[in-house]
Amino acid sequence: MARPDHRASLTDLSRGVPFSRRHIGPSAADQQQMLDTVGYSSAEDLLDAAMPGAIRTTQALNLPAAATEPEVIAELRQIASRNRVMSQMIGLGYYGTHTPPVVLRNVLENPSWYTAYTPYQPEISQGRLEALLNFQTVISDLTGLPTAGASLLDEATAAAEAMTLARRAGKSKSSRFVVDADAFPQTISVIATRAEPLGIEVTVADLSAGLPEGDFFGVLIQYPGASGAVRDHAALISEAHERGAIVAVAADLLSLTLLRAPGEIGADIAVGSAQRFGVPMGFGGPHAGYMSVRAGLERSMPGRLVGVSKDADGDPAYRLALQTREQHIRREKATSNICTAQVLLAVMASMYAVWHGPDGLKQIAERAHRNATVLAAGLRAGGVEVAHEYFFDTVTARVPGRAAEIVHAAADAGVNLRLVDADLVGIACDETTTDGDLLSVWRAFGLGSLSISDLDAATPDALPDALLRSSAYLEHPVFSAHRSETQLLRYLKSLADKDYALDRGMIPLGSCTMKLNATTEMEPVTWPEFGSIHPFAPVEQAAGYEELVRTLEGWLAEVTGYDAVSVQPNAGSQGELAGLLAIRAYHRDNGQAHRDVCLIPSSAHGTNAASAVMAGMRVVVVACDDEGNVDLADLDAKIAKHVENLSAIMVTYPSTHGVYEEGITELCGKVHAAGGQVYVDGANLNALLGFAKPGQFGADVSHLNLHKTFCIPHGGGGPGVGPVAVGAHLAPYLPGHPLHEGTKVGPVSAAPHGSAGILPISWAYLRLMGPDGLAKATASAVLAANYVAARLREHYPVLYSGNKGLVAHECILDLRGITRDSGVTVDDVAKRLVDYGFHAPTMSFPVAGTLMVEPTESEDLGELDRFIDAMIAIRGEIAQVQDGVWPADDNPLRNAPHTAAAVTAEEWAHPYSRQTAAYPGGVTAVKYWPPVRRIDQAYGDRNLVCSCPSPEAFED
Ligand SMILES: *Cc1c(COP(=O)(O)O)cnc(C)c1O
């Protein structure tokens, strides 16, 4: 019934402004203005012109209509309430931990940390680089090995990386890798998945009985073991070395405050997880995996490495070391495919160490150990056999035939134990273990009243003397300087102030989709009902998570047009590997095991080729034509040459050149006709969502990057989630559960649902946007990129455009001609943008000498114009260099970025003013000041320093 006057209905008023209007930057009026500039009357017309009709879907997405922010929070509370918060004493690499509240609020819940990008531009990333260097120092000190990386994806994949590192660094000709039977079962599973396509034979051996017969190139030892047993492996390690093998030790970081370090017992490599350093369990992740290595192996390490170099004034400055060995750049020569890692979680773990310091960490370890010894003493007093004399925090109890019953009884009392088998129960203590937990455990074993204090007084430690740690650790002042909360708060703030994140301005990084990470999406991540669930808790305790995962996988299948999705891969790179393993297994089951050629266009992201190699495939590069499209003639030639062995093609759509290729459906048809499968890299889904579905326009499998299109923040270089989506024929080959054997393809992550703890973010995004909001976001993202291209085209050539001169969701600005004429490089422009208050676009990917701009839908018109105006002003500055007004070696571009110290120095000898240096766009009240001047990359690579430098290094 029509309303009598113009009042809005109560329903409308309650709904408020739709979330999509908060997520999408430009207002309707601004969008109209942008459309006028691009030359289209509506976003629909623009999309119709830019996107090939052949790939367009006609139906709206079948997703629930948009909900409001309060509704989404209420729904997620409802889902969360179906997870059961327990005392988690399962162990297996996941432990209870108290996140220091000052770290929880000021890192994990702080956009200055979580919205930052990977620190490729070191001058504007000194804060997180310092935090990561602290992390590396923690790992290096505790493991007793000189070089540690800035995080890997989880412990199990880190162990798999250790295996391949051992293979390429060692001298052994053997293709066999020996794994400790007392390693975590999920580690053994992931190693098996990763070994098989590489032709590595894995032998799981009871190392307490010594090394197996025969040759092997490497050994992985778990220290302490999954059973809790603490063994002295020194003799075993030296025997392995004598037999030509490299030894990796998967070590528990907390135990290393009490136990001899892996490096001290001879390990070449240490790996593990930093989860228990203040990072919630989150049903399996995200957590920082770690790796450290002995001298001589640092240049073969996977993942990123932070190092110290110096800036233009000779002052120490941090940056990513050895970037030219980054796996992207090495493509098919890559030895690992890792790209997005776990920076935010590594920062949290490092701050946990900064907060507690060496003494505090040792106390936490001693408490966990004491709890375990008292627990074991109580069990023994009650006549229960304890399997090991020496243990750190985990006790294995032998209870023939009674294990299941005891685990159930404990669960009824709110405590999760590990059901090892019918006869064995595992019990892990940690920082959060209480007296009540110990009493509950004893009761579950049927033991009567025991006195904790009496047992404590009467029971000695259970660590072998020969393994007691005597070496110091965390002696750097940073680990003792921030003991009060005020001090740590200010330290965190001072680091965040050095960095440029989305809370300052736009980060127009092509291929990275640095869009809004909304607060409502982030909020649930730190709820205990999501944070404190153990990944191997009984399924009925994780009903909320199971529902969340099932719904999200269903929605992702709907938006991509595939039939099945797994959220297990914990980065895009891991989704790639999972997708290629599915293809490989599919061919094998069809009697086509010989198909091993993977076609990859020259424009592809480096992880594609790296993943193909890891999946045991041979990479064959397909050329691109002058328009940046896959050269279909070359494709024909390569298919013809490899038709017998063609396994797959991996293409990115829209391409990394930022255009919708017209030939995509034809390309899919050609590959299918030759018996190959089509992998579409879904990193650029932000240009398709709601308009086209890879699963419908001809692809068989894709990965998505939830940390790009689906709003998980980049965290300064991780976490991420890289779901793999497949057609029905590949569904049986999705990654298996890490604790279940017999799946067609094994797991690619340690936890069944990977980094489950951050899935509420993407769930919330889809729920908040609804089908219309998602389509609007895509249209707005494409409009923004075309607006940038239209306005900058006369100043910088736009390298590629597709149909009607339009780009997709990003555009490549070609500086090569400008560099040739003026000597000004992409680097100079990127650093000069810092003076103007911007993060640089993507540099020299996918084409050297270019900048790739992806504005995303979340940037408002004012911010887009500010960026465009800065780029135009920079073009004017370049002209001044070109015209000889400024010398090629002394101009605001070459000297950028300018620090406060540089522009306020007594001396100013440059041919441009201090104001031009620091306030090129005019003086503003708020300005981002980079803390260091341009950093000398080569110096740092020649003089590799990858742990905290002494404070003296920073003196004048
Ligand atoms: C980001 C990206 C990847 C890699 O994803 P990660 O999550 O960083 O592992 C692969 N392909 C393309 C095109 C990308 O942009």
Image (cartoon, rainbow, N blue to C red):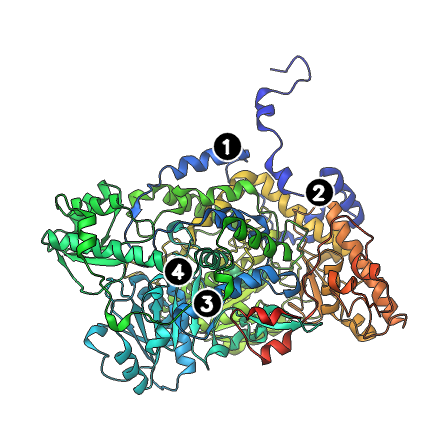
- Distance CA(mark 3)–CA(mark 2): 51 Å
Query: What number is the disc on residue 71?
Result: 1
Classify mark 2 as within 8 Å of ligand 1 or not, answering yes or no: no
Of badges 1 and 3, nearer the viewer stands 3
Of badges 4 and 1, nearer the viewer stands 4
Quarter of the image that includes the N terminus: top right
Q: Which residue is under mark 4?
A: 359
Check disc 3 and give the amino acid type: Glu
- Do we see residue 602 in this rendering? no
Of marks 2 and 4, which one's residue comes earlier in the chain?
A: 2
Q: Is residue 426 left or right of residue 263?
A: left
Query: What number is the disc on residue 26?
Result: 2
**How busy is the neighbourhood of tag 3: few (under 14 within 10 Å), some, or many (20 plus)?**
few
Task: Using the image as rendered, state which of residue 726 and residue 126 is in the foreground.
Answer: 126
Q: Secondary structure at mark 1?
A: helix
Q: Measured from the top left, where is residue 907 in percent x and y?
A: 82, 68
Q: Secondary structure at mark 2?
A: loop
